Image (cartoon, rainbow, N blue to C red):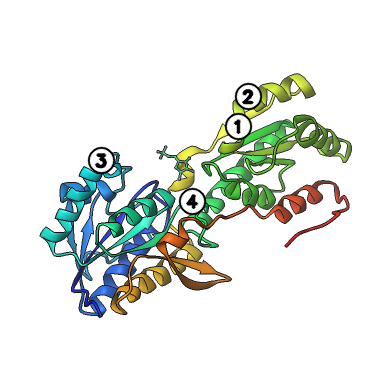
Amino acid sequence: MKKFKRIGVLTSGGDAPGMNAAVRAVTRTALANGIECVGIRRGWQGLITSDFVPLTRESVGHILSRGGTILFTARSDDFLSEKGRLRAVNTCKMLGLDGIVAIGGDGTFRGALELSRLGVPVVGIPATIDNDVGCTNYTIGFDTACNTAIECIDRLRDTMQSHERCSIVEVMGRNAGFLALYVGISVGATAVLVPEHETDFQRDVVERIQGSRLAGNTHFMIVVAEGAGSAVELGQKIKEAVGMEPRVTILGHIQRGGAPNARDRETATRMGYYAVNAFVEGRGNCIIGTKEGSIVEIPIEEALVMEKHLQMDRYQIMEAMQFGGTINRVDR
Ligand code: F6P
């Protein structure tokens, strides 16, 4: 069985609340098992340029509650080339790294797979506010980002209510609608537009606003996933179709900041622990995920072809909340 003496940990791609908690868990679990831990700064790029910092029990103290990532993050173009990846392998040799824990999303794991093919064992920890990683039910940062968006929208609702307006809020999520749908349900949105459900403007927006108005509402909240189209264009269309002057808010990067909540701290800590455990038990080249609340380990090649679908029952439930209509069939 391969004995791991020193490992590297990095954060890559868009940051997510809870990444620091995962770095701390990786470091402390490694140290508890007699393994040294080195922080690679700026993601895969840092592995190419040998940008590193030794991590100690103390240096990862008081980061559990901090948003962002103390290791910085980047999206590395150099790592996309064989030349860049070979330089990264050299850094691993130079630093004596027996394995790498990579914290990030899908793009990060594609990089991890390439590195594993060059002989460096890797373990991935999913962290992205998009929750769009196929092999895991949950990605670190999603819950905090939902709560941040909800808090912002609750504030918006106050002023929209006073002015009897229509509000359009664009949330992040890249090509996935998880963030938009969970947030939409949680704020009681009039309509939620997600990339996974083709939008019929008349049915999904106009009629829902009209129905809501007939039900006695005087303000309307539309939540749009960034992957479902432009909130500004939607605002223009609503203005023309319904004769209202909607206000558009793009929440943007505010959703990525802030202290991780309980779920993200706890999940990140468990994932960090199990990631190092995989190395301790002589395994590598896997992604740590969650399934029905428990931690699972999926071989990286398998993990990267797994697909994740938006739960359309949630979409139907969101629709039913507005009018209390009959749900024909809810697939769970
Ligand atoms: O993947 C996380 C994410 O925040 C997406 O929701 C968004 O599309 C993207 O990153 C924004 O990336 P950047 O930070 O490069 O603007």
Residue behind mark 1? 229
Q: Mark 2 touching mark 1, by CB under 8 A?
A: yes
Question: Hey, which quadrant is residue 268 in on the image?
Answer: bottom left
The crowding category of the residue bearing disc 3, from other C-alpha atoms within 10 Å (few below 14, some 14 to 19, many at least 20), is some
Measured in 3D between alpha carbons, the distance from the residue under mark 4 to the one under mark 1, in whole angstroms, is: 19 Å
Label ID, residue 129: 4
The amino acid type found where label 1 is placed reads: Gly
Q: What element carries label 1?
A: loop
The amino acid type found where label 3 is placed reads: Asp
- Give the mark toward the camera: 2 or 1: 1
Location of the C terminus by quadrant is bottom right
Residue behind mark 3? 78
- Residue 172 visible within the image: yes
The crowding category of the residue bearing disc 1, from other C-alpha atoms within 10 Å (few below 14, some 14 to 19, many at least 20), is some
Measured in 3D between alpha carbons, the distance from the residue under mark 3 to the one under mark 2, in whole angstroms, is: 36 Å
Measured in 3D between alpha carbons, the distance from the residue under mark 3 to the one under mark 4, in whole angstroms, is: 25 Å
**Of the image marks 3 and 2, the number of the one nearer the N terminus:** 3
Residue behind mark 2? 233
**Of the image marks 1 and 3, the number of the one nearer the N terminus:** 3
Q: What element carries label 3?
A: helix
Identify the residue at image location x=31%, y=68%. 26
